[in-house]
Image (spheres, rainbow, N blue to C red):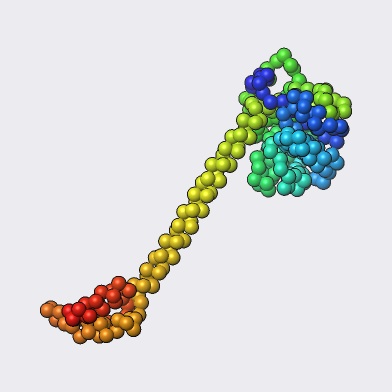
Amino acid sequence: MQSRNPNNSRGIDISHYQTVSSWQRVRDSGIVDFVYAKASQGISWVDSSFLTHVAGARSVGLPVGAYHYLDAGDQATAIAEAENFAMVIAGLPLELDPVVDVEDAANTAEAALAFLQRFEKVTGRRPMVYTYPSFIDEKLSNALADYRLWYAYYNADGTPADRGGWTEWTFLQYSEKGYVPGIDGPVDLDEFNGRVEDVFNEINKLQAQCQTLLNTAEAHIERIVQLEGAVKQLNEKNNMSCPDWAKDAIVAAMNTTLPNGQKLVDTPDGGSYDFYRLVTILHRANII
């Protein structure tokens, strides 16, 4: 895996164990670029400070994500936990990808995978996995390597070795005893592999491109509707009944025989407006 980078964004993860006395001081500290807040645990528990933490972080412009602590040791319970997490964060403006914390002694690779798959199916969002080195070795092996990794690694001088099929971390928790102004007591410190603002700028750019495409598609749809209306009108005009003002001309045309013996007009109806207009002009000019 990669080493830490001083140019990367740094942030914190918090739960009801942390009391934030001033989110503005947290923001002004210059060492917090993002916040992860614990949302839920098990099949029904909700962190009592979750919504307060989300609102506080967003009030000072910090991007926010949510995580769930997995209790399950079996697939059925894990699925229920995924639905609990999905319900707790539903409708909230969370910019960072959701995370499942896989570190409990009861957890199994099968349960964690069931949680991840169920959550993605329910929400459409692909979650990340938070875990630590020895837990990967003892419980997970390579089972979750298709998901991005939030890695708990506290060796400040070392570079994490590849583990469990992972060759890169997306987030790195590098301390559980950090100090941040505005937060009472110790707090977990994290690092993102890159700059969070770059990610969101790219997301905003993609959203703008999607909106442009949507606007273009809507314009095309409107034009298609207009064309369909024009075609409908044309078809109606091409199959109109003989108007009163053209009846004398049409009668004359029906009584006119061509040199080959065919009638100039066989039936009075089914012509277009332009056809009736032409026949009327020929009639008034005494051509027919």
The quadrant holding residue 75 is top right
Q: Quadrant of residue 265?
A: bottom left
Residue 250 x/y as whole percent: 26, 82
Residue at image x 81%, y 32%? 23
Q: Nearer the viewer, residue 225 or 251?
A: 251
Quadrant of image for the N terminus: top right
Give the x, y percent position of residue 33: 72, 29
Please state which of residues 88 and 231 is positioned toward the viewer in this rendering.
231
Residue 72 place in picture, x, y as percent? 78, 40
Name above or below for residue 89 compared with residue 222. above
Q: Is residue 264 above or below residue 58?
A: below
Q: Quadrant of residue 268?
A: bottom left
* The one of 146 and 250 positioned closer to us in this rendering: 250
User: Residue pushed farthest top?
Assistant: 157
Whole-percent x and y of residue 117? 67, 43
Whether residue 247 sits left or right of residue 171 in the image: it is left
Please identify the residue farthest to the left as the structure is shown.
259
Tell me which residue sits at (81%, 23%) in the image.
Answer: 178
Q: Residue at x 72, y 25 (%)?
A: 10
Q: In the rendered view, would you say 108 is above or below 283?
A: above
The residue shown at (80%, 31%) is 24
Q: Quadrant of the C terminus?
A: bottom left
The reply to whether residue 226 is visible in this rendering is yes
Above/below status of 180 relative to 84: above
Q: Is residue 266 visible?
A: no
Picture mark count:
0
